[in-house]
Structure formats: structure tokens, C-alpha cells
Image (spheres, rainbow, N blue to C red):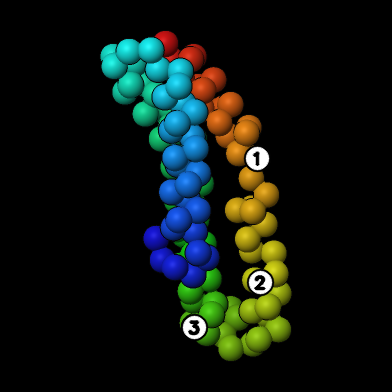
């Protein structure tokens, strides 16, 4: 993950939160692959989007975005709302969703 959103450590903490919560519901090793599949299904889209948008921010702040260039007002406009989807995530709902998905797979 590129450093332009400061999300490397944040995503690791979210992963740990999901995994510790999820594995609290795993009763034996035979169901661990299903738990990991549920984790992957819930977490991968968010982590991929964080990676993609971090690259986009990198292009913005280095003036390499073809639609924005070095227009500071446009850059500021982009950056003002760009992170809301990251910051406003309901982590409790995310944990509930991964546990529900895991239990449905049993």
C-alpha cells in the first residue's frame, strides 16, 4: 500500500479487529478456512479500494493527475472529501457482517 493516505497501519488494525472477533467464533480448526474466506470476502474490497485511492492521492499531491494537474483549488477540493469513506466506516457492522457470513457457511 502506498503511503499517501496513511492507511497501512489503520488497515492492519482493522484486520486485527475483524480477525480477533471472527476467531472468537471458530470452535475447531476445521472451520478456520471458512472463517478466513468470510474475512477475505468482507475485508478485501475495502483494502483494495484503500490501495487504489492511495495511488490516486499520490497522483494528486505530485501534480500528476491529468484532470487536476497543479491546480491547488482542485486538489484541495478533491482531498476535502476523499477520505470520508475510510473515516466513516462502521467497524461494528463490519465485524457483525463477517461473523454472520462465517456462520452462514457452516
> What residue is at 32 percent from the left and 13 percent from the top?
28
Verify CB contact (< 8 Å) between mark 3 and mark 1: no
Q: Is the residue 60 above or below the residue 48 in the image? A: below
Tell me which numbered mark, 3 or 1, is placed earlier along the sequence.
3
Residue 4 seen anywhere in this rendered image of the structure:
yes
Outermost residue, bottom side = 70
Q: Secondary structure at mark 2?
A: helix
- In three-dimensional space, the C-alpha distance between marks 2 and 1, rounded to whole angstroms, equals 23 Å
Residue 66 seen anywhere in this rendered image of the structure:
no
Q: Secondary structure at mark 1?
A: loop
Crowding around mark 2 (Cα neighbors within 10 Å: few <14, some 14 to 19, many 20+) is some
Q: Is the residue 64 above or below the residue 101 in the image? A: below
Closer to the eye: label 2 or 1: 1
Q: Secondary structure at mark 3?
A: loop
Q: Which residue in the protein does label 2 denote?
A: 78
Q: Quadrant of the C terminus?
A: top left
User: x%, y% of residue 76?
Assistant: 68, 78
- In three-dimensional space, the C-alpha distance between marks 3 and 2, rounded to whole angstroms, equals 13 Å
Closer to the eye: label 3 or 1: 1
Verify CB contact (< 8 Å) between mark 2 and mark 1: no
User: x%, y% of residue 48?
Assistant: 45, 51
Q: Which residue in the protein does label 1 denote?
A: 90
Q: Which residue in the protein does label 3 denote?
A: 62
Tell me which numbered mark, 2 or 1, is placed earlier along the sequence.
2
- In three-dimensional space, the C-alpha distance between marks 3 and 1, rounded to whole angstroms, equals 31 Å
Amino acid at each position: 500500500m502506498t503511503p499517501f493516505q496513511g492507511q497501512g497501519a489503520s488497515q492492519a488494525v482493522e484486520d486485527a479487529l475483524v480477525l480477533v472477533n471472527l476467531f472468537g467464533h471458530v470452535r475447531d480448526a476445521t472451520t478456520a478456512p471458512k472463517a478466513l474466506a468470510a474475512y477475505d470476502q468482507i475485508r478485501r474490497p475495502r483494502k483494495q479500494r484503500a490501495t487504489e485511492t492511495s495511488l490516486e492521492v499520490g497522483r494528486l499531491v505530485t501534480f500528476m493527475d491529468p484532470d487536476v494537474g497543479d491546480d491547488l483549488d482542485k486538489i484541495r477540493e478533491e482531498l476535502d472529501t476523499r477520505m470520508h469513506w475510510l473515516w466513516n466506516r462502521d467497524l461494528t457492522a463490519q465485524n457483525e457482517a463477517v461473523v454472520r457470513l462465517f456462520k452462514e457457511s457452516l
